[in-house]
Image: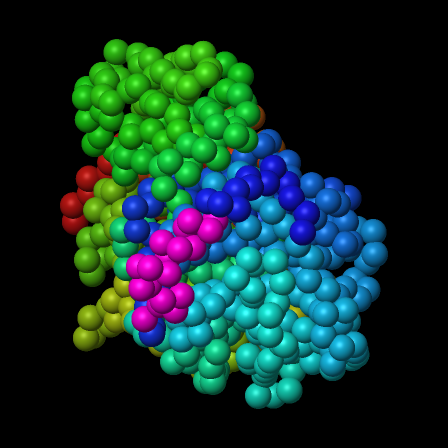
């Protein structure tokens, strides 16, 4: 057995402890179906992970968190153990960490494999590690075919994990294994008392009923049951689980995917939040280099909580362990770096957390806060690198910046000047895009209908709406249309809705046009917040005549105040229009036209309105992933065009001085009975968006600013703002 900073115990001490253990009458086996509560006495979290397939990335790294959501890497995101000295391949992957039943010993296991050097060729071993302080680790290598002759044909030994089996009174290691070109199957065996080897031959723990591969097993006990989460392969790829009464099975498949994304996922891990009945299921979105966190109370229904999560590193396939304050201090004393221990965030719910600007160069902090926040006695509730003392409980931010001091043992005091100011933009919490806005006569309220954003590759599958009495204070009204539940003809890419209110003899009716799977559908409801019922088929499913490229997306609906006729507009790469039939759910045959502006700037996101007899066409130029995404416009004398291009028709674009980028895909609101106008649009999340590359294009935020016209009726350029607008009080 090889030792890394190994703390040895003298033989006489070991003999003495063994005698005490035997005389106490305590059995090695714990009572059935009981486990050490690994959150008891804990106040922080340790994230164990590796970072990728490149040189030096296949090594164990540590990060810590105080809340289970915001993690900061230790040791500058460098390995905490040398992978060459603990493995046969020179690299380790998929680390799993466990607190033992004694509450003070830790086991860690990992895949013995180095893709950077050997590719995805065969691997045969796993690494077992043991520690009593999380800092000093002893290690050993278990080569499966070398140890067990009956497993000579094995060519994969992947993603080991450890759990205590109370019936056997032993620690069980389980992992996926493959023979030849067969399916990967999850096996288990018991570790010896020293946790240096396997003392039993591997047995099958779980295999796919369909005969396909299953890998990356993760078992968590709950309510006397064992929940085995795993990744399916070759039969639809994603996270499923199986449940058993005993840790060794038999496991019964719960045949339903539990991951909440359309992206490829692997390496799921579940941990319980400290002081809570909630669990986090996290998994590796390995194609896009990020993690997704979901939360559940029953380990069956999961909600995405990515908006609460932050990391200053990009992990691959890891696990999280609750730890005590002493353990946290020990880890940070050993591996924290001077540059690590700045401020992380502010937890006061009045603060718009996504938009906090922490400048560690100038030592300043800008806290954007919600409307109506009392800044005379305001407490930001700062979080900092674990183990750091923050001195700023409350201050009067109306008089200018307030000083915040950070102290950490062995370091000089670090000081920030903190500014807090009201910021209406963004108007919604979280990531949303492509906003459609409606004033509803039926309720006297305003409604926003955005794309649900924050999903890699624009892979959201549901739509929400938000209501407001004044365009500043918004209420989440929940999901109004879920493609997977409510739409039979499409289940992906829920994008860019549009809505119109129609008064009928019996009340009001709402027609909701939306994009799904690059087609346009329509759903109806009797209230602005639904429930909406899909028509059962797409309204637009193919290219207009003469068009061969682009997408059928981004609908806009417009009622001509002159004729009373209704029109549907759509297109990406082209702009099409057709008249709607009186039923509002079908297009009038023979009325479809292509009216793409001739200046070559049209990309997508058309919005049409009229003012003083003139028709205005607004659209987005460039790509939504580009910082130069922006809004142009044209005018016409008819809803059918042609569209004339005014001079200086760029009306909304980035403002680097304010850190505002990617401003586009808008709608427009006229306050009824007035000449007061507002433009509603999305931008990159601020301040992080400009640093995110293409990912900024699906981490967008909704903003509202005033829009004005000159004396000739042309739209004045709009300056995007952080402050936003004042409340609009409108009474019918």
Q: In this view, does 191 lie above or below 320?
A: below
* Identity of the residue drawn at 24% across and 26% down: 379
Task: Where is residue 347? Give x, y as percent.
Answer: 32, 36
Can residue 70 be seen here?
A: no
**Which one is in front, 102 or 340?**
102
Can residue 283 be seen here?
A: yes
Q: Is residue 280 above or below residue 542?
A: above
**Which one is in front, 649 or 158?**
158
Task: Where is residue 639? Give x, y as percent.
Answer: 50, 57
Q: In this view, does 7 lie above or below 565?
A: above
- The picture quadrant where one finds residue 206 is bottom right
Residue 531 highlighted magenta (yes or no): no
- The picture quadrant where one finds residue 634 is top right
User: For the magenta stretch, what is the residue range?
Assistant: 14-31
> How has the structure been colored for display?
rainbow
* Identity of the residue drawn at 33% across and 63% down: 26
How many marks overall?
0
Task: Where is residue 188? Give x, y as percent.
Answer: 57, 74
Task: Where is residue 705? Give x, y as percent.
Answer: 39, 35
**Which one is in front, 271 or 415?**
271
* Identity of the residue drawn at 77% across and 49% down: 90
Q: In this view, does 522 lie to the left or right of 622?
A: left
Residue 29 highlighted magenta (yes or no): yes
* Identity of the residue drawn at 53% across and 21% down: 338
């Amino acid at each position: 057995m090889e030792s890394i900073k190994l703390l040895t115990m003298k033989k006489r001490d070991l003999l003495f402890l063994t005698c005490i253990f035997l005389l106490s009458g305590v059995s090695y086996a714990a009572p059935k179906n009981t486990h050490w509560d690994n959150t008891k006495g804990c106040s922080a979290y340790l994230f164990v992970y590796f970072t990728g397939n490149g040189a030096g990335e296949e090594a164990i790294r540590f990060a810590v968190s105080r809340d289970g959501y915001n993690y900061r890497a230790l040791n500058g995101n460098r390995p905490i153990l040398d992978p060459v000295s603990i493995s046969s391949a020179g690299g380790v992957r998929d680390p799993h960490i466990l607190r033992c039943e004694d509450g003070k010993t830790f086991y860690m296991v990992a895949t013995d494999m180095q893709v950077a050097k050997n590719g995805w060729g065969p691997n045969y071993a796993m690494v077992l590690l043991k520690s009593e302080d999380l800092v000093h680790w002893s290690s050993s290598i278990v080569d499966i075919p070398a140890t067990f002759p009956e497993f000579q044909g094995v060519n994969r030994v992947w993603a080991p994990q450890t759990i205590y089996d109370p019936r056997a009174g032993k620690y069980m290691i389980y992992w996926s294994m493959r023979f030849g070109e067969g399916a990967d199957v999850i096996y288990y065996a018991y570790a010896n008392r020293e946790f240096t080897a396997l003392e039993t031959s591997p047995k099958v723990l779980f295999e796919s009923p369909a005969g396909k591969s299953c890998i990356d097993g993760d078992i968590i006990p709950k309510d006397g049951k064992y929940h085995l989460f795993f990744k399916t392969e070759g039969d639809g790829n994603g996270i499923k689980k199986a449940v058993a009464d005993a840790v060794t099975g038999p496991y019964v498949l719960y045949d339903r995917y539990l991951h909440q994304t359309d992206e490829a996922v692997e390496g799921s891990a579940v941990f319980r939040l400290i002081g809570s009945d909630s669990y986090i299921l996290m998994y590796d979105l390995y194609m896009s280099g990020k993690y997704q966190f979901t939360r559940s109370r029953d380990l069956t229904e999961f909600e995405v909580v990515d908006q609460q999560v932050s990391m200053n590193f990009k992990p691959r396939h890891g696990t999280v362990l609750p730890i005590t304050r002493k353990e946290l201090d020990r880890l940070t004393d050993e591996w924290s770096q001077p540059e690590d221990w700045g401020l992380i965030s502010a937890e006061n719910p009045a603060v718009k957390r996504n938009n906090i600007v922490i400048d560690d160069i100038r030592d300043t902090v800008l806290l954007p806060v919600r409307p109506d926040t009392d800044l005379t006695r305001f407490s930001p509730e700062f979080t900092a690198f674990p183990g750091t003392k923050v001195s700023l409980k409350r201050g009067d931010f109306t008089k200018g910046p307030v000083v915040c001091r950070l102290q950490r043992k062995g370091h000089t005091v670090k000081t920030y000047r903190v500014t807090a100011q009201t910021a209406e933009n963004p108007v919604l919490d979280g990531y949303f895009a492509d906003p459609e806005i409606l004033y509803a006569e039926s309720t006297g309220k305003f409604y926003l209908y955005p794309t649900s954003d924050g999903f890699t590759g624009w892979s959201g599958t549901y739509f929400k709406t938000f209501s407001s009495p004044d365009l500043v204070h918004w209420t989440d009204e929940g999901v109004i249309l879920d493609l997977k539940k409510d739409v039979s003809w499409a289940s992906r890419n829920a994008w860019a809705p549009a809505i119109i209110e129609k008064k009928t003899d019996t009340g009001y009716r709402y027609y909701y046009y939306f994009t799904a799977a690059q087609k346009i559908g329509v759903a109806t409801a009797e209230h602005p917040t639904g429930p909406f019922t899909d028509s059962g088929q797409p309204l637009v499913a193919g290219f207009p005549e003469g068009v061969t490229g682009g997408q059928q997306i981004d609908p806009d609906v417009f009622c001509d105040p002159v004729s009373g006729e209704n029109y549907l507009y759509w297109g990406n790469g082209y702009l099409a229009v057709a008249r709607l039939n009186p039923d509002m759910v079908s297009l009038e045959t023979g009325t479809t036209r292509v009216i793409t502006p001739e200046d070559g700037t049209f990309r997508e996101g058309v919005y049409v309105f009229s003012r003083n007899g003139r028709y205005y066409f607004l659209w987005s130029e460039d790509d939504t992933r580009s910082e130069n995404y922006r809004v142009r416009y044209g005018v016409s004398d008819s809803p059918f065009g042609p569209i004339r291009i005014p001079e200086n028709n760029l009306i909304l674009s980035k403002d680097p001085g304010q850190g505002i980028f990617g401003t586009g895909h808008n709608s427009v609101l006229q306050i009824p009975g007035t000449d007061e106008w507002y433009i509603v649009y999305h931008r990159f999340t601020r301040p992080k968006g400009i640093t995110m590359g293409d990912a900024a294009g699906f981490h967008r935020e909704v903003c509202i600013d005033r829009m004005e016209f000159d004396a000739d009726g042309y739209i004045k350029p709009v300056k995007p703002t952080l402050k936003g607008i004042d409340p609009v009080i409108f009474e019918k």
